[in-house]
Amino acid sequence: MAFKFDVRRANAEKKYAGDLFFSFEADPSLIGIPFVGFSSPVEARLRYEILEDDSVEVTGRIAFTLKGSCSRCLKETEQRIEGEAEGYFVPDCENGEDYSYSNGVIDFGEFLRDEVAFLLPARLVCSETCAAPGYKED
Ligand SMILES: [Zn+2]
């Protein structure tokens, strides 16, 4: 799967900002909820901006659907998950906080994986009753 973005080419074409769209099957092993899986591809709508020092700022939204057994009552349920995504990519970055890229090409694979993992809920619930506080997980 290709999540590459050619910063050099975008610079050469003076496309210093623009939109990116990725749609892909997420890694099912990211989900830690029993009997729950992805029921749609992950869709990432991102906006990039190349800054003067060639670092690249990416913001946008990520959405996907989870399907499986309610973590409380086991009823089959489905939930749309949507959230904001944000990443900062620095050429040959070594600070360990930002994403690094080299040779003028960004690979968004790790970033997208991180963002999906971040958005995943701890459990899947079918209704407000099942989502009510006071429920103890064992
Ligand atoms: Zn339920």
Image (cartoon, rainbow, N blue to C red):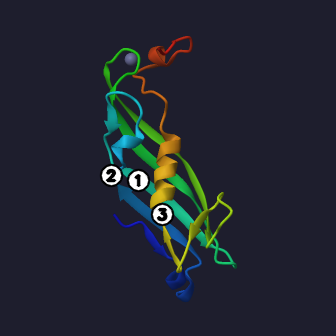
Inspect the image, locate mark 1, and give the three-letter code of the amino acid beneath it.
Answer: Glu
Q: Which mark is residue 31?
A: none
The residue lying at 36 percent from left, 27 percent from top is 34
> Nearer the N terminus, badge 1 or badge 2?
2
Task: Say which of 137 and 71 sits in front.
Answer: 137
Q: Nearer the viewer, mark 1 or mark 3?
A: 3
Q: CA distance from mark 2 to mark 3?
A: 14 Å
The residue lying at 64 percent from left, 61 percent from top is 98
Q: Is residue 8 above or below residue 131?
A: below
Q: Which residue is mark 1?
A: 43
Residue 48, image x and y in percent? 57, 68
Q: Is residue 105 above or below residue 33?
A: below
- Kindly check if marks 2 and 3 are in contact, taking CB atoms under 8 A apart as contact: no
Q: Which mark is residue 25?
A: 2
Q: Nearer the viewer, mark 1 or mark 2?
A: 2
- Rendered-image quarter of ligand 1: top left
The residue lying at 53 percent from left, 80 percent from top is 104
Q: Which mark is residue 108?
A: 3
The residue lying at 41 percent from left, 42 percent from top is 30
Image position of 130 (left or right of 74): right
**Image quadrant assignment for residue 49:** bottom right
The residue at label 3 has a CB less than 8 Å from ligand 1: no
Inspect the image, locate mark 3, and give the three-letter code of the amino acid beneath it.
Answer: Phe
**Image quadrant assignment for residue 73:** top left
Crowding at mark 2 (Cα within 10 Å: few <14, some 14-19, many 20+):
few
